[in-house]
Image (cartoon, grey):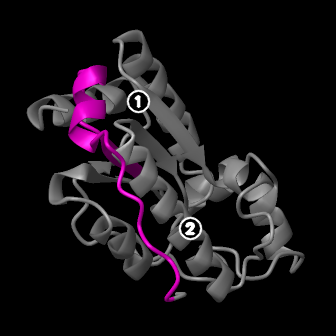
């Protein structure tokens, strides 16, 4: 980092922004294999929170790679940088007072731990969407598993690149019932006064 950079402190604090929105800012981080249902669940959660009057924003893996991270590939170094940038973006969104809902495969434990380290202890909520590889591959909504099996995609998580299962996620999703899963997440958020 350059010695010529200085952090500019805003006159308005994160606490003031959150108070204006009447909510506690946080990151709800969905992780799991491609096709596990992360984006579907993230969208259902955002819709429910929006209808309840909360201020949210979704960051989705494919969407972020269309813009902010379009210069990154899918090799291990690029995947690490992808999550690092997203983590820094989440930190800014939380500072703005938002509830940030993230849906990223984020296969490496150290990268998820890094994002967690950018935030206060209760501001990062890891949601592990634990859908078995066989089901994800059967769903294959984007045809990526088929391409990976045919050798057309390298470094594809679950096929020729590892997925490191979360060690202690705040929420562990094992069922396919979207309504029930959203309810479980909302209950957790309510218990945390978010």
Residue at label 2?
Answer: 85
As displayed, is residue 80 above or below residue 189? below
Q: Which residues are magenta?
A: 3-30
How packed mark 2 is, by other alpha carbons closer than 10 Å (few <14, some 14-19, many 20 or more), is some
The numbered dot on residue 150 is none
Residue 160 appears in view: no
The numbered dot on residue 177 is 1
- Residue 130 is situated, as x and y percent measured from the top left of the image, at 40, 56
**Could you tell me how many numbered marks the image carries?**
2
Pointer 2 or 1: first along the chain: 2
- On screen, residue 47 versus residue 135, left or right, reads left
User: Quick one: SS at disc 2?
Assistant: helix
Residue 56 or residue 151, whichever sits in front:
56
Task: Indicate whether residue 110 is drawn in magenta.
Answer: no
As displayed, is residue 49 above or below residue 37? above
Residue 53 or residue 47, whichever sits in front:
53
Query: Viewer-nearest of labels 2 and 1?
Result: 2
Residue beneath the point at 34% across and 12% down: 52
Quadrant in which residue 86 is drawn: bottom right
Residue 96 or residue 5, whichever sits in front:
5
Q: How far apart are the two marked residues, 2 and 1, measured between alpha carbons?
A: 32 Å
- Residue 30 is situated, as x and y percent measured from the top left of the image, at 43, 51
User: Quick one: SS at disc 1?
Assistant: loop
């Amino acid at each position: 980092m350059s010695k010529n950079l200085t952090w500019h402190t805003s006159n308005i604090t994160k606490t003031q922004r959150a108070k204006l929105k009447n909510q506690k800012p946080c990151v709800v981080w969905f992780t799991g294999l491609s096709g596990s249902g992360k984006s579907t669940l993230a969208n259902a959660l955002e819709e429910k929170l929006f209808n309840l009057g909360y201020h949210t924003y979704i960051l989705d893996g494919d969407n972020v790679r269309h813009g902010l991270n379009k210069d990154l590939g899918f090799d291990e170094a690029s995947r690490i940088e992808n999550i690092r940038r997203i983590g820094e973006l989440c930190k800014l969104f939380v500072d703005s007072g938002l509830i940030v809902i993230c849906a990223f495969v984020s296969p490496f434990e150290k990268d998820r731990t890094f994002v967690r380290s950018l935030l206060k202890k209760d501001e990062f909520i890891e949601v592990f969407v634990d859908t078995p590889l066989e089901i994800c591959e059967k769903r294959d909504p984007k045809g990526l598993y088929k391409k990976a099996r045919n050798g057309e995609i390298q470094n594809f998580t679950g096929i020729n690149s590892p997925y490191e299962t979360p060690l202690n996620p705040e929420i562990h999703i094992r069922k396919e019932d979207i309504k029930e899963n959203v309810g479980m997440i909302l209950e957790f958020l309510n218990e945390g006064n978010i």
